[in-house]
Amino acid sequence: MRNAPSTVSADGIGNRRYVSHERNVVQSPFGTVDIPTKSVTEYIFAGYEKYADKPAVTCGASKRSYTYGMAYEMILRMARGLLSQKGCAMRKNDVLGLLLPNIPEFVPALHGGLMAGLSVTFANPMYTAEEVCRQFENAGVTAIVTLPMLLPVAELFKMKVKQYKGTICIGGKHDLDKNIYGFEQFLKENHKSELPEIDIHKTAILPYSSGTTGLPKGVELTHYNLVANLAQGSHPDISKYYQPEYLDRKDTILTIPPFFHIYGLNGILHSVLKSKNHVVSIPRDRQLPSKVNWRAVKFKVFIPPTVTIADFTQ
């Protein structure tokens, strides 16, 4: 923030004395925040065992749902498969690209990559193939997680990369000749590999700006950045779920904002999982009236105006 001058000569050119920087610091009424030195996955899923049989994330369109225990096991298997020589054979600090709408598998895809020590970027699945390729090339992506209908985009990108490690297709099957792994089979193979120690100050995710002032630009966010933001929102005066009387009370929270956007990701998805509530995601808004049990939903998170999102569930 720019400091205002305390004195200015009549012509506006004379010597200026600036007020202290400290006078422009806005202090939080909630005091300081202790920021844990943990990876974002470790921080979010801390204590998940107590809620292992409780729903974590559900697709509001298909009703496909994973409990906290299932989600964490999928994350572990995803991480090991990404690093395994019989899997994608990725290495710590490689970049994983997600080309996905808001589906439950976004959680193990993202956090499996983070647990493997990778950096993860994600693109809007409604982007053109050229837009996706530009972002993934810029980010240094060497493997992609996507859906069958978006495989042609991944195949196009693969041709542009010299050391491409593989495509994991959610809802697809293995096609090893094309270096494609079916997500379900990939996890069931239960690959073995040693998981690395996570440097919380390395780039965890690499979201891209919307390109308002030119082409989209990557924003490096570390594990520490993400955890700090979540810790701020975990103050009991900000979130009731950290107040004593709500610690064991869990709600269902419906969300539409995309997980490939930082608000949808850290502000909603991660915040809900951190508080061990139940998030219901909707790949497109036309499914709201007929597919959602509205009586079970405590909160609904939208961005006005809500726009129609293409159907990626077919």
Image: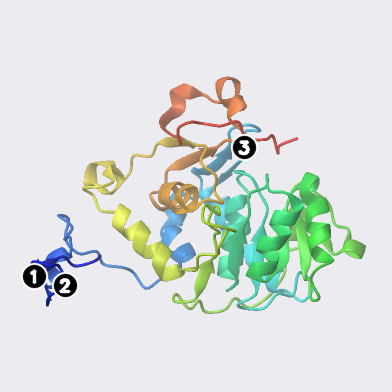
**Nearest to the observer: residue 138 or residue 288:** 138
The N terminus lies in quadrant: bottom left
Q: Position of residue 191 (x, y in %)?
A: 72, 69
Rendering quarter of residue 224: bottom left
For label 3, count other residues whose C-alpha is less than 10 Å away and answer few (under 14), some (14-19) or many (20+).
many
For label 2, count other residues whose C-alpha is less than 10 Å away and answer few (under 14), some (14-19) or many (20+).
few
Instruction: Using the image, determine if residue 13 lies above or below residue 110.
Output: below
Q: Disc number at residue 9?
A: 1
Foreground tag (3 vs 1):
1
Foreground tag (2 vs 3):
2
Q: Position of residue 126 (x, y in %)?
A: 68, 44
Single out the residue that lies furthest toward the right.
Answer: 177
Q: Are marks 2 and 3 in contact (CB under 8 Å)?
A: no
Q: CA distance from mark 2 to mark 3?
A: 58 Å
Per the image, label 2 sits on a secondary structure element best described as: loop
Q: CA distance from mark 3 to mark 1?
A: 60 Å
Identify residue type, mark 3: Pro
Q: Disc number at residue 283?
A: 3
Q: CA distance from mark 2 to mark 1?
A: 6 Å
Decide if residue 201 is on the left or right side of residue 132. left
| Residue 75 in view here | no
State the residue at coordinates (30%, 53%): 234
Mark 2 highlights which residue? 13
Q: Are marks 2 and 1 in contact (CB under 8 Å)?
A: yes
State the residue at coordinates (59%, 64%): 120
Q: Earlier in the sequence, mark 2 or mark 3?
A: 2
**Nearest to the observer: residue 205 or residue 303:** 303
Identify residue type, mark 1: Ser
